[in-house]
Image (cartoon, rainbow, N blue to C red):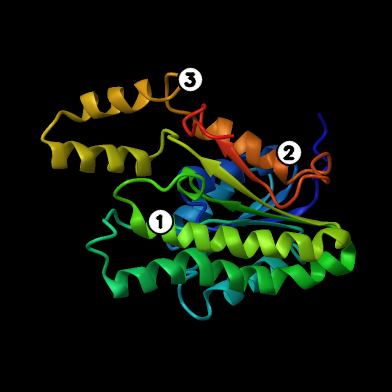
């Protein structure tokens, strides 16, 4: 299938590792001009150098000027972005009963406010052109809150509500707005969560991972490449009638429809 995004400018936030990197690589493979962004500037540039047409931008999106710096760098390199992939680092584990207000504010800043600033900077040009793709990398916690991850649950649910509202407002302008919800994808983040659980429960990490995989109908963790391919489709021309949707890429982990 021709995804129709060759030559489109794609900005992928927090793409120096994990799911963000997988999405950047998938979009680049389909011919998009990709802006790789992350706090680790050297790594962003190294990743970009290995892609067909990409630039690496060192940026901290949680700073007040970070989103503006990223969008300006994209425009300088390629012009106005037509694809915006929202992503942010996963907050630390924690319980709702032990929630700290300062930690919650930080989670909302990185998972909602920074993402909204990026949308505000890129959306007007998408609407003028009559074509745009906004995709947020979320979490299965949006569909079913995950135990011990209250900061992620709260921040990503807030972003989902904002994007669902936005989707209806811009659909007639040719701009789609969607979320892609990973389950257990084999990334460093999932490995860290398994390790944290193993420490809490005083169990070997291998046992924790095996139990986690057994709870997934597919019987395994997903791969970053599988996630990236799904994201690329949602950013494509053929997906032009898919908007306001939270699609799960989780091997059947969440049992609700």
Q: Secondary structure at mark 3?
A: loop
Q: Secondary structure at mark 2?
A: loop
Q: Is residue 28 above or below residue 61?
A: above
Residue annotated with mark 1: 152
Horizontal placement of 90 versus 85: left or right? left
Q: Nearer the viewer, residue 23 or 250?
A: 250
Q: Is residue 181 above or below residue 132?
A: above
Q: Position of residue 121 (x, y in %)?
A: 68, 74
Q: Nearer the viewer, residue 257 or 237?
A: 257
Answer with the quarter of the image where residue 184 lies: top left
Q: Nearer the viewer, residue 94 or 59?
A: 94
Quadrant of the rendering where the N terminus is positioned: top right
Question: Alpha carbon of mark 2 to alpha carbon of mark 1: how far?
Answer: 31 Å
Question: Alpha carbon of mark 1 to alpha carbon of mark 3: how far?
Answer: 24 Å
Q: Earlier in the sequence, mark 3 or mark 2?
A: 2
User: What residue is shown at x 82% (from left), y 58% (from top)?
Assistant: 171
Mark 3 or 2: the one toward you: 3
User: What residue is shown at x 51% (from left), y 27% (from top)?
Assistant: 251
Residue annotated with mark 2: 30
Q: Position of residue 22 (x, y in %)?
A: 55, 41
Residues at circles 2 and 1 in contact by the CB criterion of under 8 Å: no
Label 2 crowd bin: few (<14), some (14–19), many (20+), radius 10 Å:
many
Horizontal placement of 190 versus 28: left or right? left
Q: Secondary structure at mark 1?
A: helix
Horizontal placement of 99 versus 219: left or right? left
Q: Earlier in the sequence, mark 2 or mark 1?
A: 2
User: What residue is shown at x 35% (from left), y 20% (from top)?
Assistant: 214
Residue annotated with mark 3: 218
Horizontal placement of 235 versus 105: left or right? right
Question: Alpha carbon of mark 3 to alpha carbon of mark 2: how far?
Answer: 27 Å
Q: Position of residue 161 (x, y in %)?
A: 59, 61
């Amino acid at each position: 299938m021709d995804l129709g995004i060759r030559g489109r400018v794609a900005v992928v936030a927090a793409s120096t590792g994990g799911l963000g990197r997988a999405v950047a690589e998938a979009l680049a493979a389909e011919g998009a001009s990709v802006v790789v962004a992350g706090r680790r500037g050297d790594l962003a540039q190294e990743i970009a150098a290995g892609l067909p047409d990409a630039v690496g931008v060192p940026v901290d999106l949680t700073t007040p000027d970070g989103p503006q710096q990223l969008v300006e760098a994209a425009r300088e390199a390629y012009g106005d972005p037509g694809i915006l992939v929202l992503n942010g680092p996963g907050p630390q584990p924690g319980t709702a009963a032990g929630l700290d207000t300062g930690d919650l504010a930080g989670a909302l800043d990185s998972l909602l406010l920074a993402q909204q600033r990026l949308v505000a900077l890129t959306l007007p040009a998408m609407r003028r052109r009559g074509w745009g793709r906004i995709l947020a990398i979320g979490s299965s916690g949006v569909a079913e809150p995950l135990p011990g991850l209250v900061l992620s649950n709260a921040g990503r649910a807030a972003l989902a509500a904002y994007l669902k509202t936005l989707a209806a407002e811009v659909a007639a302008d040719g701009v789609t707005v969607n979320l892609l919800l990973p389950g257990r994808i084999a990334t460093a983040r999932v490995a860290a969560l398994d390790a944290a659980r193993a420490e809490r429960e005083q169990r070997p990490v291998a046992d924790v991972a095996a139990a986690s995989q057994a709870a997934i109908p597919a019987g395994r963790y997903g791969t970053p490449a599988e996630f990236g391919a799904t994201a690329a489709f949602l950013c494509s021309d053929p997906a032009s009638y898919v908007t306001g949707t939270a699609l799960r890429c989780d091997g059947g982990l969440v049992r609700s429809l």
